[in-house]
Image: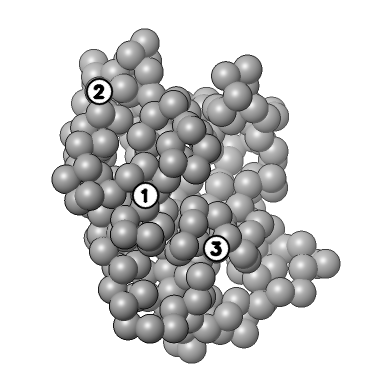
Amino acid sequence: MSITRDEELIGMKKVSEAVALTLKEMRNYAKPGMTTKQLDNFGAKILSDFGAKSAPYLTYGFPGWTCISVNDEFCHGIPSNKRILKEGDLVNIDVSAELDGFWSDNGGSFVLGQDINQHQKLIEASREILHKAIYNIKGGVRISDIGHIMETEAKKRGFKVIKNLGGHGIGRSLHEQPDELLNYRNRFDQRRFKKNSVVAIETFIATTSSYTTELNDGWTMVGNKGGFMAQHEHTIVVTDGKPIVLTKMNEIWN
């Protein structure tokens, strides 16, 4: 969507607060020995207290309120009573929701407890790359140039980017134009970011895979060559200068 009135910015700030604080509280609540379903139920209660509804459930009938992916699951992991979190797990939580006709999306990967499996370097790369990418976005900037920053920064750190996942426009629905805001430069993509547009920018930084494939459950994505992936995501408003990071209070950069 494009922000044209103050009420639209207020609406986007409200739903973004809901998803950002839900993500933050879920991260703080996650503990070894807990199931991903318990964690999802905790997040569902927070969203409900805000009056917000789960976006993947509303849009796709996703079998959970949030997406929770663990270790070799890259994204769209289904919360389960059988999946028990363990010390050192690489966990990704993606929270998106609708509130009063506005939609917002955010996510982040983190290590549960001690980093016994050495995932922190990957996570830091994803966080830092998202920060650099977002603060290079303003009206008129080529979408593919931001993808180029992401891929270049990933390679510098010895990582790859996932090429079949990307950020997207958002605001009046979960996925809007511009779609396919990719983590690499597509030289055929001549589109530019537009001032006042709302977009969800996300990193997909991986150790060994460049593409994801879907498991038989119809949702969960894993790497085509295995390994691990970290994702971080903010919903922003594009301006002539620094973007407005609507989901900043999720504290994934802290």
Q: Which residue is the site of mark 3?
A: 169
> Whole-Å distance between the Cαs marked 1 and 2?
19 Å
The amino acid type, in three-letter code, at marker 1 is Ala
> Whole-Å distance between the Cαs marked 2 and 3?
30 Å
- Residue 139 in the image: state x and y as whole percent: 56, 84
Q: Residue at x 25, y 23 (%)?
A: 38
Mark 2 or mark 3: whose residue is earlier in sequence: 2
Q: Residue at x 26, y 36 (%)?
A: 44
| Closer-to-camera residue (59/93) | 59
> Whole-Å distance between the Cαs marked 3 and 1?
14 Å
> Which residue lies most toward the front here?
100
Position of 164 relative to 135 (above/below): above
Position of 44 relative to 149 (above/below): above
- Residue 226 in the image: state x and y as whole percent: 63, 26
Q: Which residue is the site of mark 1?
A: 97
Question: Which dot, 1 or 2, sits closer to the camera?
Answer: 1
What element does badge 1 sit on? strand
